[in-house]
Structure formats: structure tokens, C-alpha cells
Amino acid sequence: MHKEAAIREPLILGNKNYHDITTDVVGPIENKAPKGWYVLITISSLIAIWGLGCVVYLIATGIGVWGLNKTVGWAWDITNFVWWVGIGHAGTLISAVLLLFRQKWRMAINRSAEAMTIFAVMMAALFPGIHMGRIWLAYFVFPLPNMFGSLWVNFNSPLLWDVFAISTYFSVSLVFWYIGLIPDFATIRDRMTKPLAKKVYSFLSFGWSGKAKNWTRFEEVSLVLAGLATPLVFSVHSIVSMDFATSVIPGWHTTIFPPYFVSGAVFSGFAMVLTLLLVMRKVMRLENYITIKHVEYMNIVIIVTGSIVGVAYITELFISWYSGVEYESYAFINRFSGPYWWAYWSMMTCNVISPQLFWFKKLRTNLTFTFILSIVVNIGMWFERFVIIVTSIHRDYVPSSWSMFHPTWVDIGIFVGTIGIFFTLFLLFARFFPVLALNELKSILKSSGEKYKNEDH
Amino acid sequence: MAETKKNSTVIHAMFDDDGRLMDAAKDLVAQGVRIRDVYSPFPIHGIDPVIGVKRTRMAVVSFMFGMTGLSLALLGMWYFMISDWPMNIGGKPSFSLIQNIPSFIPVTFEFTVLCAAHGMAITYLLRNGTIPGMPPVNPDPRTTDDKFVMEITDEQNPGVSTDDLGIMLKSAGAIEINEKEITA
């Protein structure tokens, strides 16, 4: 069996055995939900309903109800799209990349991070969909035989690459997540006493029995899926960045975009994972599984990716001057000193300065501080996308077309609404699904559990 | 328990620790006993060669589906963009696949991953027999929680009597032994 170094901190605290892991995770599903859960889900579903109402209004009226004008044709919608896709990236990074690197601390957080990924990508996919205006023609993005001669979609366009990237990303993440869930649903099925719940979990567990051969296949499939998902996750945000980078708009037309977007995505995704998990570990009493050490590891990822993002910002500024291209220089001077200076400097403060505070061990192991900073980072990352998108296009080539973007209540309503839908889905997940990967945690209990580690020495 | 020679008997020996089951399995196999299967709540690393489970070929399946996806994507894009309706979009070449291939790479990659992942996942579910609506076959509900069960049939072990097997399993650390007769 795999041995962990004795000085490595245990990942499962407390005097836990296999049965305790099951009870700690399945217990909250079997018992009544705490009052707080009802309060939270009421608030978030009300916001979700408001958001959906705004979407219906938008589709019924047309995208003129957004604040877009003929100069700023992309604004909050695409900002939100990129923001949500970026948030999704942490889940895949945790479950796939950390699996390939054999990072055992991923096992306590991968299940909920992947759930977050799936919900975030759903929210992201909403925006290009509703931006089409006539959403009932959304099938036009697929290369389907049609009645207009044989007019196909344009495979040279990054917007079409995006269609393929996002749909592949969403469906592969979903499958990866569900394959991991099947054995854990079986655990719930075998414990459940309520007949209806037993039936539902029995259906969800697909008749999983845990034979030796099943487990061999399970591990192989997880490894291969991780190997496939790793380049996939990098490709998805690279392609999202090419939506901008392949255009000739000053401020967008830069080769640095793919790595810059990917690290930004991981940065914001880890922040969102922390926002969710710090609450979840408290409410569901999972402090023994999602330990301070886990939080610290995630904060280290935030420092690394936050620093990459910072370097990217500075490189962009430098190159805009060094290139000697007037339009390019102007786009960047305008970013930090033009009418949107406040967005630029909020982005700089939230994304470049604030994560550097995590160099202090006191701060990166402080849960309250981490929670606040995780929200700050997500605000910063939203501003990053806003800055890239709106400030680059609001100064058109002809000064008579210069313009500003003012969001309407529909812009705001839909954005806030997606946050509501996201939290509603996550709360439902936390209530009815095993929030930790039971089978994976049990497999590391002997090498990384506090009880076993102490027994050995 | 009454014994009839005509029916086959399945013995389910339950262990409360994966390490103990592993040692017991090695022990029994060394004594010539064949173990049909092991049910566990998580993968027990190293059990496969002991009980004679062969290496899975899921990775090969995935590779083949991936190759199919790659070919289909290239074939499709060649047909849509080069053969059926070539268009001059932004001055990019559209009259030969080789010249246009750089802008086909992203979709080719995505479609390869799509097919490799889903093809493998579907094969995995079918081969495991884990399909919606299938009844579970684990002998005891505790095997998905914290217990480990070894399954031995007398059919596969004609040389050893079930009583002897019981004694061997008990001494190897089994906490519970259940015999079940199956009328074949």
C-alpha cells in the first residue's frame, strides 16, 4: 500500500474509521435539513425566479432591453459568460489535474468542486444562448443539414469553437462527476430506510455492487477521464480567450490571452470553491475532512494563479507601449486612466494586490480572512472581464461613435439571477448528494488519516 | 446448514478490514482456494492479481473512440468547409484541408475528447452492468459502507469441503460467514 511521509499533515482528522466517514457524509442527507438551509434556499430560489423572469422578459422583448448600443455590442452578457466559465475551471482542475499529480487533498473537495463546475457552466451557457436574441434558432450553431442550400456553420470561427468546447466541457464534466457518484449513491442506497428515498438512490446508483473488477475499471476510467479532462480544461478557456484574441480590436488582439485567461479562470474558480466550501464545512460539520490544511493548499493555488494574472496584466501594459502601435497604446492608457479607470483599478486591487496577502501563513490559514478574500477575488475577476470587454470597444475607431455602457435593470437582473440559480442548485446538491467522495476518502484513510498516522509512530 | 452435493454453495466471508481481507485472500490462494469475487466499499489496491482479475482494457476503448472522433471531426469539417460549400471567410484558405487545418484543430481536439470520454463511459457502464434500473448484487448492504466480502463457490473449489473452507476463513479473520445454496 502507498505510504505517506510521517511529517506530512493528516488529511482526515479525528478518530475516524470507515463507518464514520459514511455516517458523517450520509447523515445530513438522512436527517432533516437545518433551518438555515431552508432560509438560504428560499432566498436563492427567489433570486433565481427573478432572474428567470428577466430572461423571459428579454426573450419576449428582444435584447434591446439590455444596455447595449451600437458601439458596445458586448458587455455584461459576455462578461458573465466568461466569468462563469472561469469559475467552472477549478472543479476540473481539482478533480483531473490534481488526480494526475496524485494530490490526495483533492479527495475532500473534488465532489463539490465538480458540482460547482457543472452548475457554473450551465450558467455560462445561458448567456450566449440568450444573447442570440432569437433563442429558438439556437440550433443554428450546430452543423445540421438545412433548407438553405447546404449552408454550414463556419469552422474557422472561434465562436463556433466555443460551441464545441463548452458543450464538450459540460458533458465530459458531468460524466466524470457522475461516474464518481455512482458508488457513493450505492452507499446511500444500502443505508437508506425510507422506501421512496431508497428507490430513488437505487435508481441513481445504477445497481453498483462494488466487485473487484468494477473497481479496477472504475480507477482506470477515472484516470483516463482525468487525462482527457486536463487538456480539455485548458483548451476551453483558451478558446474562450480566442473569441477576443482572434479579432483585430486593440486590447483584444494579443497572443498572451490563452494562458492569461486559463490562469485567471483557475484563480476565480478556486476563490468560488473556497466561498462555497468554507460555509459548507461549517454547516455540515465537515471540519475533519475539509481541514485548515486544505484551505491553505487552495490559498497557495490562489497566490500562484493570482501572480500569473498580475504578470499578465503588467505584460499587456508593457507590450502595448513597446509595440509602438498607437491604437494598442491608447487602448491601455484609456483602460487605466479613461472613464473606466475605476473598473481597472478595482480589478488591479482585487486580483493583483489582495492575493499577495496570502504569503502570510497567518492569513492563509485564517478562515474568515480567506472567506472575505475569496469574494474579493471573484469581484476582481468579474471586473477583469468587464474591463477587457467594455473598455476595449467603447472607444471605437471613429470618435463620433465613442460611447459608454450603462446596464439596465434587465442586465443586472439576469446576472444576479444566475447567482441565485447557481446557489439554488448548489444547495440542492449539498442536501441530497454525497458532498464528499466517500469511496476515495476511505481509500486514503489509512495513509492520510490522523488516527492511523499516529498509530504508526 | 444442510448440505446437498447437487446444488452449488456460495460462501460469503465478511471482513472488517481491507488489509485483513487481503492477507486472507493471499493465504487462501496459496492453499489452492479459488476466490470468485470480492465486494468492497472502495478499491482495494493489489487485490486484482491475487484473485485473478485481469487488467482492464478501458484505456484501449477510450483510445479507439478518440480516434473515431478525430477522424469523424476531420471528415466532417472537410466536407462542410472544403468539399460541399467552400467559402472565402476573412481571406482564409478554404480549398484544401491541409491549408485550412490550423483553424480546424480546436474542433478536432474537442470532438476527439468528446468521443473518447463518452465512448469509454458508456462502455464502462455496460461492461460493469451498471445501468439505470439494474438491481444491486452485493451480498450484504454493509459492503458499500465499511465491510469487505469475499465470495467463494464450491463449484470452483471441488477439492475443498465447505466446512474446511469455513474453518480456513475463520482462522484468516473473517467476522461472519454465510453459506447460500443456489439451485442451478
Image (cartoon, coloured by chain):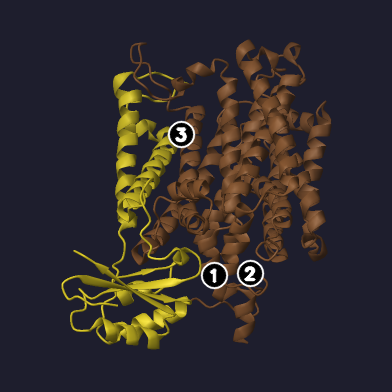
Chain colours: A brown, B yellow
Q: Which of pointers 3 and 2 lies earlier in the amino acid sequence? A: 2
**Marks 1 and 3: in contact by CB < 8 Å?**
no
Instruction: Give the label on residue A12, or none.
Output: 2
Q: Which of pointers 2 and 1 lies earlier in the amino acid sequence? A: 2
Read off the residue under disc 3. Answer: A164
Q: Quadrant of the C terminus of chain A?
A: bottom right
Name the amino acid type tagged 3: Phe
Name the amino acid type tagged 1: Ile
Q: Is residue A9 left or right of residue B130?
A: right
Query: How far is disc 3 from disc 2 in space, using C-alphas?
Result: 39 Å
Read off the residue under disc 1. Answer: A444
Q: Nearer the viewer, residue B8 or A96?
A: B8
Asked whether the residues under marks 3 and 1 belong to the same chain, the reply is: yes
Up the image or down, A232 lies above or below A143; here it is below
Up the image or down, A128 lies above or below A280; here it is above
Determine which quarter of the picture holds residue A64: top right
Up the image or down, A323 lies above or below B53; here it is above
Name the amino acid type tagged 2: Ile
Q: Is residue B111 left or right of residue A262?
A: left
Check disc 1 and report its element: helix, strand or loop: helix
